[in-house]
Amino acid sequence: MDDSSTTTLGERVRRAQRGDEVALRELIVAYQRRVAGFAFAITGRSDSVEDLAQMVFIKMVRAIGRLNAPEQFESWLFRLARNTCIDHLRRQKLRRIFTPFAPEHENMPEADGAVDSEELDALRHALDQLRPKDRALLALVQEGRSHAEIAETFKTSVAAVKARLHRAREQLRQHYTSDEH
Amino acid sequence: MNTEDKAWKRLRDTAAAQITPGFADRVLRAARAEATPLFVSHFLMCAATAALCLAAVAVYQSRATGDEDASNLAGWREIAAQSNDLDQGL
């Protein structure tokens, strides 16, 4: 991201922090597609994407005033998104313990037209074999985020990000390749 | 673009297609709706706590005063009885 867009984003975030609804709406519109893609990559279900994106942005609206460094808005937003998606998966897992469904309901196919591509199905299946944290990592790379930015998002070191990313890529490739054949 | 990259692009496009028109407005409305009851519920919680504390102080105060009155009355009765005894002795 160049300096001018960082300045524009920083200014927009500062306006949003002052309660400017236009700035808040601009931020939501600017990031809604990316957050939706990120949520889909982590959860693997397109039918919960909009609800999850809504939860992420509601949290953003409520907490943006406490963001100390407006320049780090993107890292902060994707951290919110990652935590929201992982919490959602945990809650689902807990719910399954208390209200177990039959196996055929667990793998209920998505509605017609929701997912209509073999290559996407293969990727979703491969992602499903990975841990949610690794899915989030790969999704951030696909977002075009640098290792430093991912480290900032995950609150870890660049070296740790590189190591985990290497492992996650290997795993994804393994499952993706085996699905293709 | 290799197959994996195409699949990732498809994933992003599919996800983006799930966002229905008016999403930003719905988020802002929902955020406002959540914020208002939160403020009201915080206010009600504070008011209820304050009322409970006041009631507890009032009950304690009334009991303490009652005990003190009873003890004073008992003292006075004792003095009155002793004084009666003295009057009769004279």
Image: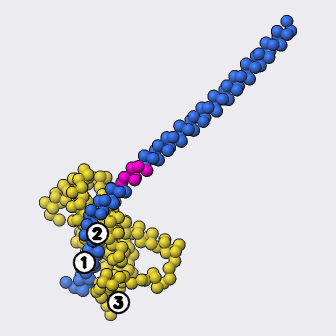
Chain colours: A yellow, B blue
Residue A57 lies, with reference to residue B51, above or below; the image says below
Whether residue A75 appears in magenta in the rendering, the answer is: no
**Share a chain, discs 2 and 1?**
no
Q: CA distance from mark 2 to mark 1?
A: 12 Å
Label 3: few (<14), some or many (≥20) within 10 Å? Answer: few
Given residues B44 and A33, the one toward you in this image is: B44
Chain-order first, disc 2 or disc 3:
2
Label 1: few (<14), some or many (≥20) within 10 Å? Answer: some
Which amino acid is tagged 3?
Ser
Which residue is at 27% across, 62% downward? Answer: B25
Q: CA distance from mark 2 to mark 3?
A: 29 Å
Residue A75 screen position, x and y as percent: 27, 63
- Residue ID for mark 3: A178
The subunit letter for the residue under badge 3 reads: A
* Camera sees residue A134: no
- Residue ID for mark 2: A35
Callout 3: helix, strand or loop?
helix
